[in-house]
């Protein structure tokens, strides 16, 4: 930057036509004698223009009209004894001119102001009028002109550099091509107030005749009438046409006296080329050309950055594997829709059934190609007025910008597609969800997409291939969204509590342990059912924090019971997604050590389905936990994929019979027989069997007769806060004696 500063200061004031000197003197005869030696004076080969004023007030007015005055010869005493000093104060403070050289002239020798006054008023020189000879006066004028020239050149160079910095910052804020080009035009015209015309032309195809293909994208001044026309139409100046051709041919800037053509192209722009044309009312000074070259470097970098931003935007709005628009693009399109567009538009979401299975069998590339084929299939079915985006790897969204009644019959050819791929006939079934955008005017783009996904989910859950999103689903979605936000905050604020439900021996009625159950008391005072907030936590990635907090509360509950002489284990449910984390078991052991809880007082309850699906990865970890003294209970046994082979190999301690068998055994002989088989299976494998959901004495007696070891349910006690467990235990124990 210092090198550039030196280069700019070398000839920065060469554009000045002459230098100005002002004489402020109320003695007209003496003023005339001053003008005589200055009339033939020259500096840097340029004439000196002489200006006169006969009072401080008239001088101040003249200075405001000529801010480029170089030297002032100022009489001290005029209207008043301090008129000269007051004028100096006006020049420096009010007019803000700190460059002009002020030479104070006094009437008599010895009347010069003291140094403190000269410093205070920023006076550069002081002489007695009687001491000023012809040669002396010329020497004083030339010396102060030289000083002013140097200071002014430095100031203008600094202003030029400051303009470059600020211009670069302003241009950097533009990220789209047209606004950027318009900003380039504005910056150049600010740099050269003497411009006559400025235009930016662009071509997106490099060839032998760029002037006829390049269009004027932005223009002002004498070129404004050529806006959106070919560059070749700017033909009133043959020299300028030659300069433009030369710029395109040589790929470089061209300077032509009072005209210049700047050329811009780079790898990021591809085949795009841009030129900037500037015409001035005077010759372009050498220092101005240098400044313009530096500015051109910044403009070129700006073109490159805008092109890169365009490529990044393309990546942001397109799926790289398929080349289709993605969810970001769909969100942007929905955001830009007018009210009239929303009234006539619909959003159809299509999800491929068994996509993961197809991709596993045929490969990842097949999955990408399948979605591409479906994209082409949809384009054939919806002939016009539609845009298609890939929102998930197995889901396509169709934005239909016209009014049309769609139902399951009309969409049958869409949701049951059949086409040839690699010489093989493929049938693809899809689930369709329809959102009529006009019916949900207050929905944001994200909510509209979520509405389509919600329709897909409900259709899949109900075994349907088509579902229209309605107010009921909307209410459910809004409620779920609000509940999700509340749950997230409740977990962060540790508002989830643990209730304990007792486990009882069915043989002798003794208390054998407790199960920890997560409870959430909403801020409005009601308890949110676990079957609502636990799946919600699993679906939005909060289950890890929830599980950790419940385990920590369970550990503290164990210690609380221990202090009250209740030495019984507490079983804690664990989510399947948590079991698959490589660090879960290490963190569990660390938590038990941190809370100083004996491992034999914590049991893990894992669903049967989780155990079997992840048997290979879980087996060594469960063995490690069992060796530490932690018991593993198989929860909801009988509802998953029960297998003697798995039970014989997995390190489990307890089978927990699902409550559905307990509730149905009085009415279903099959359920009773399954229940009996589970109890007998557990006993033969030396596994403890516990039945949950016991609500009546008859159920309890039947389970006892079958040989079931333990039970829990409302017959014994509902889940209760930890603070109530001690008193309940005392009362229950007393009742059993």
Image: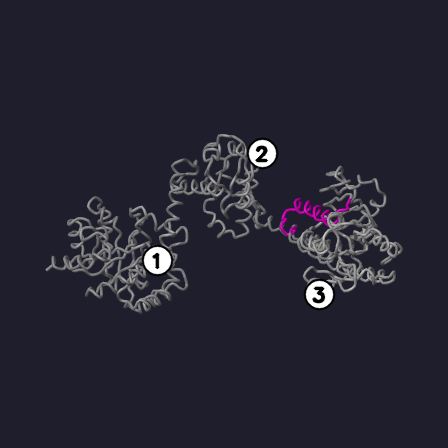
Magenta part of the protein: which range? 170-195
Q: Please, what secondary structure does the residue beneath circle 1 have?
A: helix
Q: Which residue is mark 3?
A: 115
Report the front residue among 358 and 446: 446
Image quarter of residue 287: bottom right
- Crowding around mark 1 (Cα neighbors within 10 Å: few <14, some 14 to 19, many 20+) is some
Residue 663 located left or right of residue 339: left
Alpha carbon distance from label 3 to label 2: 87 Å
Reading the chain from its start, which is encountered first: label 2 or label 1? 2
Q: Which residue is mark 2?
A: 384
Which label lies toward us, 2 or 1? Answer: 1
Q: Quadrant of the N terminus?
A: bottom right
Q: Please, what secondary structure does the residue beneath circle 3 have?
A: helix
Image quarter of residue 625: bottom left
Alpha carbon distance from label 2 to label 1: 50 Å
- Crowding around mark 2 (Cα neighbors within 10 Å: few <14, some 14 to 19, many 20+) is few
Which label lies toward us, 1 or 3? Answer: 3
Verify whether residue 175 appears in magenta: yes
Are discs 3 and 2 less than 8 Å apart at CB?
no
Q: Please, what secondary structure does the residue beneath circle 2 have?
A: loop
Q: Position of residue 641 (x, y in %)?
A: 33, 53
Are discs 1 and 3 less than 8 Å apart at CB?
no
Residue 691 located left or right of residue 270: left
Q: Position of residue 640 (x, y in %)?
A: 32, 52
Which residue extends farthest right?
40
Reading the chain from its start, which is encountered first: label 1 or label 3? 3
Q: Which residue is mark 1?
A: 547
Are discs 2 and 1 less than 8 Å apart at CB?
no
Q: Residue at x 15, y 49 (%)?
A: 698
């Amino acid at each position: 930057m210092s090198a550039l500063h030196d280069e700019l200061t070398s000839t920065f004031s060469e554009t000045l036509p002459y230098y100005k000197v002002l004489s402020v003197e109320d003695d007209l005869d003496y003023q005339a004698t001053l003008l005589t030696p200055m009339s033939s004076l020259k500096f840097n080969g340029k004439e000196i223009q002489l200006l006169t004023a006969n009072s401080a007030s008239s001088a101040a007015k003249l200075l405001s009209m000529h801010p480029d005055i170089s030297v002032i010869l100022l009489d001290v005493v005029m209207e008043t004894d301090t008129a000269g000093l007051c004028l100096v104060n006006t020049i420096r403070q009010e007019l803000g001119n700190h460059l002009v050289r002020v030479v104070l002239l006094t009437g008599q020798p010895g009347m010069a102001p003291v140094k403190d006054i000269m410093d205070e008023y920023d006076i550069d020189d002081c002489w007695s009028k009687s001491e000023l000879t012809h040669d002396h006066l010329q020497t004083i004028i030339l010396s102060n002109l030289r000083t002013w020239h140097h200071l002014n050149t430095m100031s203008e160079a600094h202003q030029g550099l400051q303009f470059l910095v600020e211009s670069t910052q302003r241009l950097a804020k533009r990220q789209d091509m047209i606004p950027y080009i318009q900003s380039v035009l504005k910056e150049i015209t600010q740099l050269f107030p003497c411009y006559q015309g400025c235009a930016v032309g662009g071509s997106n195809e490099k060839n032998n005749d760029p002037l006829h293909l390049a269009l004027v994208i932005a223009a002002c001044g004498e070129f404004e009438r050529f806006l959106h026309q070919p560059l070749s139409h700017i033909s009133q100046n043959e020299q300028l046409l030659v300069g433009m051709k030369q710029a395109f041919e040589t790929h470089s800037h061209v300077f032509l006296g009072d005209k210049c053509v700047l050329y811009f192209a780079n790898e990021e722009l591809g085949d795009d080329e841009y030129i900037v044309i500037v015409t001035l009312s005077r010759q372009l000074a050498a220092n101005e050309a240098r400044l313009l070259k530096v500015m051109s470097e910044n403009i070129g970098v700006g073109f490159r950055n805008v092109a890169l931003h365009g490529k990044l935007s393309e990546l942001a709005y397109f799926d790289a594997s398929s080349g289709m628009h993605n969810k970001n693009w769909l969100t942007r399109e929905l955001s830009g829709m007018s009210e009239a567009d929303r009234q006539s538009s619909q959003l159809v979401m299509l999800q491929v059934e068994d996509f993961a299975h197809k991709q596993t069998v045929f490969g990842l590339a097949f999955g990408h190609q399948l979605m591409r084929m479906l994209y082409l299939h949809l384009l054939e079915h919806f002939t016009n007025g539609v845009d298609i985006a890939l929102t998930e790897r197995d889901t396509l969204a169709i934005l239909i910008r016209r009014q049309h009644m769609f139902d399951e019959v009309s969409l049958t050819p869409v949701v049951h597609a059949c086409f040839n791929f690699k010489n093989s006939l493929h049938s693809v079934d899809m689930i369709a969800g329809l959102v009529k955008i006009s019916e949900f005017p207050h929905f944001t783009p994200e909510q509209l997409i979520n509405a389509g996904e919600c329709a897909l989910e409900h259709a899949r859950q109900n075994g349907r291939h088509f579902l229209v999103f309605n107010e009921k689903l909307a209410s459910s979605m809004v409620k779920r969204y609000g509940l999700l936000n509340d749950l997230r905050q409740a977990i962060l604020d540790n508002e989830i509590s643990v209730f304990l439900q007792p486990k009882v021996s069915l043989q002798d009625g003794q208390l054998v342990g407790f199960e920890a159950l997560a409870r959430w008391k909403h801020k409005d005072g009601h308890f949110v059912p676990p079957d609502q907030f636990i799946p919600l936590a699993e679906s939005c990635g909060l289950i890890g924090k929830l599980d950790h907090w419940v385990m920590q509360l369970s550990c503290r509950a164990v210690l609380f019971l221990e202090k009250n002489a209740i030495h019984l284990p507490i079983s804690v449910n664990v989510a399947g997604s948590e079991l698959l984390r490589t660090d879960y078991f290490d963190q569990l052991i660390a938590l038990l050590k941190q809370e100083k809880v004996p491992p034999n007082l914590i049991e893990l309850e894992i669903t049967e389905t989780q155990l079997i699906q992840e048997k290979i990865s879980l087996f060594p970890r469960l063995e490690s936990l069992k060796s530490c003294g932690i018991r593993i209970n198989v929860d909801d046994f009988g509802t998953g994929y029960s297998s003697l082979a798995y039970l014989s190999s997995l390190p489990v301690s307890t089978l927990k019979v699902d409550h559905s068998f307990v509730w149905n055994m009085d009415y279903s002989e099959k359920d009773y027989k399954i229940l009996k088989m589970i109890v007998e299976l557990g006993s033969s494998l030396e596994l403890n069997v516990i039945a949950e959901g016991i609500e009546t004495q008859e159920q309890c007696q039947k389970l006892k007769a079958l040989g079931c070891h333990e039970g829990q349910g409302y017959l014994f006690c509902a889940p209760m806060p930890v603070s109530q467990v001690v008193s309940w235990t005392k009362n229950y124990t007393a009742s059993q004696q």
